[in-house]
Amino acid sequence: MSDFHDHYPNYEVMSNHDEEHGKKARRTLWNVFWVMLAITIFELVVGFMAPSKGWSGTWWLKTLFISLTVVKAAAIVLWFMHLGHEKKVFKYTILMPYIVFMFYLIFIVLTEGTYSGKGGRLAKIDPIFVEQQKALANGHHGGGEAGEHHEAAGEEAHH
Amino acid sequence: MAHTAEIDAKEAWSGGQSPFRLSYGKMFMWFFLVSDALTFGGLLVSYGFIRHKYAEVWPKAEHVFTHFPFVEQHIPLAYVGLMTFILIMSSVTMVLAVEAGHRMDKKGVILWMFWTIVGGAAFVGSQAWEWYHFIVGTDAGALRNVWDPATGAYVKQIWHGANMITNEYGVPQFANYFFFITGFHGTHVFSGVVLNLVIFLNVIKGTYERRGHYEMVEKVGLYWHFVDLVWVFVFTFFYLL
């Protein structure tokens, strides 16, 4: 180590924990894991039920899934990646640029995105496929199992 | 952290020390992850854009990803649920390896890093399986206009599976985004497994025991959690919504 680095944080002193501290840390980590697992199972169950209940594509289901995803992401970043333990100034250094850029990008897509729908959107799509999608709405499907698709297709027709 | 005395802001930024109270290695791993996260963010936003554009002809995930190993019936979402479980689990074993490193518990680090590598390899394997079924497709297939370069015309035929131009599931962009985003993520998982393996061998050799700390485990751990973090979003946008 050069002289310059002498005042740099000493990793051994900063991060080495005793057994007592470790026990507490492990308990927290496992709790985070169980919460994340519960959220994932909940998402899968709802996702599995969605087509038959007619929830597919509803705004509240989308909102629910995206919020649960953000909750899981926050759990990973704060506890698994220990960002919650870092200095406040570092937290903002990492999170702020990302949040600002992503909100900007999402804002642009939401406000300018409808422009893409103009001018023969489906013109370059295989016409057979477009026909199949219309048939699907009337209760037919090209391949795969039948029963579930009929219900899903029935839902489609309502929109 | 709590172990070092608090320094006031003016002194912290006057040079000669880390104002973030972090080593440069960990700090730059974070900066790298932010830039990588922006790449994935951009990809997922563009995915949302194209999906919105072709909303009424975009296939539903529960019709496409229905396979499960050794099971004849079609179970939507089950396989990807298993993959998600494997990845979250390997994230937990990784953070437990980091925690063992904080206590200089070499055996603990070896044990938990081993399971992390196993989990990572299992995930890459699962993704290969998923890709295989996506590319090969169903027996029934679907009728498509397929471009024939020999005659220079479209030929009507039953098409099975997917490539970058034609697929039986929906618009070509669906397969393109599936290949690109899950492929890009899979590449990250693969390199994460390789990095974990390198650090794992160093741990066994006792490199970090001699060095007095297991910070390298923490750095690869950050990368590994990031891979899990990205999957959480890919899982939502490709399979749930």
Image (cartoon, coloured by chain):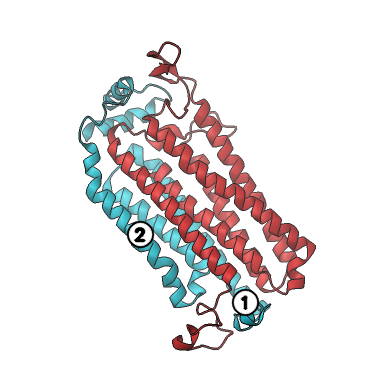
Chain colours: A cyan, B red
Residue drawn where x is 65% and y is 64% of the image: B217
Tell me the number on the disc at residue A15.
Answer: 1
Q: Secondary structure at mark 1?
A: helix
Residue B219 showing in the rendered view: yes
Q: Is residue A56 visible?
A: no
Q: Residues within 10 Å of mark 2 (few under 14, many from 20)?
A: some
Q: Residue beneath label 2, please?
A: A101
- In the rendered image, which quarter contains the N terminus of chain A? bottom right
The kind of residue tagged 1 is Ser
**Chain letter for mark 1:** A
Height in image: A65 above or below A86?
above
Of residues A57 and B124, the one drawn nearer to the viewer in this rendering:
B124
Quadrant where the image shows the C terminus of chain A: top left
User: Distance between the Cα atoms at labels 2 and 1?
Assistant: 32 Å
Element type where label 2 sits in the image: helix
Q: Please state which of residues B177 and A156 is positioned toward the viewer in this rendering.
A: B177
Where does the image place residue B191, in percent across and percent down from the top left? 61, 50
- Tell me the number on the disc at residue A111: none
Instruction: Please report, as a chain letter, where disc 2 is located.
Output: A
Question: Considering only vertical position in the picture, is B56 above or below B86?
Answer: above
| A59 to B61, vertically: above or below | below
Pointer 2 or 1: first along the chain: 1
Estimate the x, y position of residue B133 in percent, counting from the top left.
53, 30
